[in-house]
Amino acid sequence: MSRIIRVGGAQLGPLQKSEDRKIAIDRMISLLGQAHADDCQLVVFPELALTTFFPRWNMDDAREIDSYFESEMPNEATKPLFDRAKEHGVAISFGYAEIAEENGVRHHYNTSIIVDKTGHIVGKYRKTHLPGHGEFDPERAFQHLEKKYFEVGNTGFRVWRFMDGIMGMCICNDRRWPETYRVMGLQGVEMVLLGFNTPAANSQRTDEPPGLRNFHNDLSVQAGAYQNGTWVVAIAKAGTEDGHELLGGSAIVHPSGQIVARAKTLDDELIVADCDLDECNFYKETIFDFDRHRRIEHYGLITEQTGVVRPD
Ligand code: ING
């Protein structure tokens, strides 16, 4: 038996600060059309797919900051994307900056959603691991102010029964933390959908060897896939935005940890793979049969302690 989903990874090239959402949506719809023509059933777009990666800019004006956020979804800008996906009968997932009103308080999250082929939002995830810093840092070659503009997500790492499998989401920096995948792995996840906007340079180590970021990107998603017996679909917004380069390297990773599809450019580019969810079973039933092999009596520090405590 097999449970094959043809997945399209819709990498986006750069979005300049001056380019509005319509440009992003038009390009997403074009990639969606390519995916539909290739019989994809699910299309995954990057983190913060609707705008430039604005955390690189130091802003203090609330209106300017909020101009990068969506206060409802779908909305006027994104409705064409929802409508076209429904027309094609294709499920989609994408990331955006979300303003959510909870108990009368407005919260700002780095969010991603899964939308089924009828246009209904079936899952929402809000980014847990916010990298970078919360205030302007003059020492850095460029800013990474996610801790300034976003709150830590309040959804946790959930999974959803979807398209005959179990799917989960994470966002960008989350992919570097093994806890991200393991919490979903403990819920039986078979495909993790994630988008990323990763600066190609290190703002704190300008002499970082070339290629190291690509290596860390692959290492993170391949390890997460293998160690939890799950597919991982990791899709970039790539290329140079207002002089700042973002990493490419979008990839679809098999539960074995092998990359089965990989973007070659730093532009809008569709990658496609037939992902058989039953390929997860061997790993979940043998080497990573958690119930048989894990020893939680020895893992206490992982949830009892946040930082490092060294021996005296
Ligand atoms: N971007 C980067 C990421 O985690 C980063 C930030 C890059 C942190 C490299 C550490 C090393 O891919 C986002 N948006 O999380």
Image (cartoon, rainbow, N blue to C red):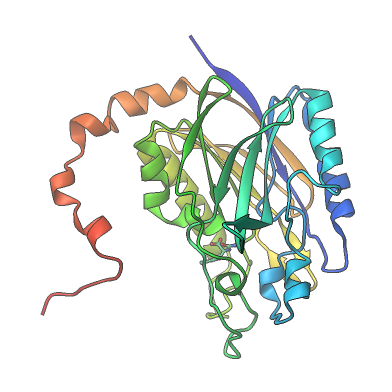
Residue 122: quarter of image: top right
Q: Is residue 73 left or right of residue 293?
A: right
Rendered view: 241 above or below 185: below
Whole-percent x, y for residue 92 in the image: 70, 35
137 relative to 94, above or below: below
Query: Can see residue 54?
Result: yes
Q: Residue furthest top?
A: 1
Horizontal and vertical percent position of residue 76: 86, 47
Q: Residue furthest front?
A: 104
For the point 63% across and 66% down, the residue is 200
For residue 311, which quarter of the picture? bottom left
**Residue 61: x, y in percent?**
74, 80
Image region (quadrant) for ligand 1: bottom right
> Is 74 on the left or on the right of 247, as rendered?
right
Image quadrant for the C terminus? bottom left
User: 289 and 69: which one is in front?
Assistant: 69
Does residue 34 appear anywhere in the picture? no
**Residue 302, position as x, y percentages in the image:** 26, 57
Q: How many marks?
A: 0
Q: Identify whether 48 is placed above or below 201.
A: above
Please report the residue visible at 58 percent of the width from the left and 68 percent of the height from the top. 210
Q: Nearer the viewer, residue 197 or 153?
A: 153
State the residue lying farthest toward the left: 312
